[in-house]
Image: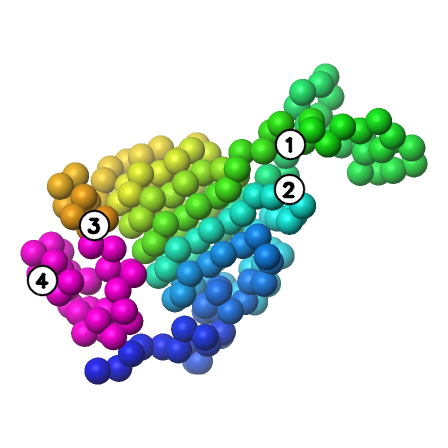
Amino acid sequence: MSLGPDPRAVHPVPAHQRIVFLRNVVTAPNVEIGEYTYYDDPDAALLFDTRNILHHYEFLGDRLVIGRFCAIATGARFVMNGANHAMTGFSTFPFNIFGGGWEDGFDFATIAAGNKGDTTVGNDVWIGADALILPGVTIGDGAIIAASSVVSRDVAPYAIVAGNPAAERRRRFEPAIVERLLALRWWDWPIDRIGRNLAAIRGADIDALEKAA
């Protein structure tokens, strides 16, 4: 049984250079991406770090964590806390960044006050084209983010969300099935077990998947 593509590959489908395994492309120290998560972009797949993760400044202390086996479509972007402006005073204009004396007296705590924490994407999440993920949200395992959605709040596991702001449209499975899927966590299985049981993983028979486990 084949063990599938090499998780260390940059281009896991050699005939399609638009597809990259992000774990092998993004090097920012405050970004963590699981194996087999890929990004598809015909023009700039290799530039995900700078074009699709916005304002990820390590000194702010926030992280972007993306799980395994996620599919991220062209133009999806993640906005980090570095995009925030101070909102504790009358003006939100970032005078301090322009220097020339405007930086004098700037209190960094006014920026930190708006920090929304880490952004977390679970495993087996599908993020549609041009979706925008705002800082501090958590997207649960198995969720689907529709194209062009703006995700400003947490997304439940196996939920489908769409719109601006993104709202839940439905759950992919009944609550009891979701509970069993989250207990199984097939994405954490050894890769040889995943390869042997793709029919159960691709299918919709929870008993068969539990038997595979």
Where on the picture, by quarter, is residue 50?
Answer: bottom right
- The residue indicated by pointer 1 is 112
- The residue indicated by pointer 4 is 211
Q: Position of residue 80 (x, y in %)?
A: 57, 43
Q: What residue type is labelled 4?
A: Lys
Query: Relative to 178, is 195 above or below?
Result: below
Location of the C terminus (image quadrant):
bottom left
User: What residue lies at 46% left-to-right and 34% top-to-bottom?
Assistant: 152
Q: Which structural element holds mark 3? A: helix
User: What residue lies at 80% left-to-right and 29% top-to-bottom?
Assistant: 106
Tell me the CA gap for discs 3 and 4: 13 Å
- The residue indicated by pointer 3 is 183
Asked whether the beta carbons under mark 2 and mark 1 sit within 8 Å of each other, the answer is yes
Q: How crowded is mark 4: few (under 14 residues within 10 Å), some or many (20 or more)?
A: few
- The residue indicated by pointer 2 is 60
Tell me the CA gap for discs 4 and 2: 45 Å
Outermost residue, top side? 90
Q: Earlier in the sequence, mark 1 or mark 3?
A: 1
Tell me the CA gap for discs 1 and 4: 48 Å
Relative horizontal placement of residue 13, taking residue 201 as reference (left or right): right
- Nearer to us in this view, 103 or 163: 103
Q: Which structural element holds mark 1? A: helix
Relative horizontal placement of residue 66, taking residue 92 as reference (left or right): left
User: What residue lies at 53% left-to-right and 34% top-to-bottom?
Assistant: 116
Q: Which amino acid does label 3 sit on?
A: Ala
What range of the chain is rendered magenta? 184-213
Query: Relative to 148, is 197 above or below?
Result: below
Tell me the CA gap for discs 2 and 1: 8 Å
